[in-house]
Image (cartoon, grey):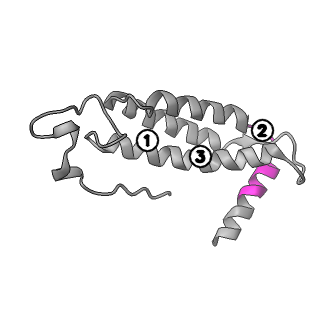
Amino acid sequence: ADAADRSLARLARLDSSTSGEYAQDVANDLRTAMQQHAGVFRTQAMLDEGVAKIAEIAQRVKNITLKDKSKVFNTARIEALEVENLIEAAQATIVSAAARKESRGAHTVNDYGDTPAHPNGRNDEEWMKHTLWYSE
């Protein structure tokens, strides 16, 4: 299916939903999880726990419902679509951060500190590369 068909399917799913969670509740939990597990001060354990937490929230995103099904000036519909987009960004961020076993720039993991072999926690031999995320 092309992008237009996928977008229409997203809208149709929201319109046909009869039960589930509201986008605002899921968005708040997503925001909290990212702040707790992918913030400025990180450890590998925090990142690994965050990967699991974001995966749980991703499942909840699939069950977002709308109380208001109107098509005009419906901010709840916009917020639901935003949460679907944000969960993709959150998954890409936290899975990539957890996979990168080093500190680099703003990605500072306390477990990977300054050593003679890896100044400032950088491991250029293994991690001087880009991280790619593919959505399923």
Question: What is the C-alpha distance between the residues marked 3 and 2?
Answer: 21 Å
- Residue at the image point whose x is 9% and y is 36% from the top: 116
Q: Which residue is mark 3?
A: 86
Question: What is the C-alpha distance between the residues marked 1 and 3?
Answer: 12 Å
Tell me the magenta residue range: 10-20
Please identify the quadrant where the N terminus is shown.
bottom right
Is residue 98 in the magenta section? no
| Disc 1 element | helix
Question: In the image, is residue 57 above or below residue 6?
Answer: above
Q: Amino acid at mark 2?
A: Ser
Is residue 11 in the magenta section? yes
The numbered dot on residue 94 is: 1
Q: Earlier in the sequence, mark 1 or mark 3?
A: 3
The picture quadrant where one finds residue 32 is top right
Q: Amino acid at mark 3?
A: Leu
The numbered dot on residue 19 is: 2
Question: In the image, is residue 55 above or below residue 125?
Answer: above
Q: Viewer-proximal residue, 66 or 106?
A: 106
Q: Main secondary structure of the magenta part?
A: helix
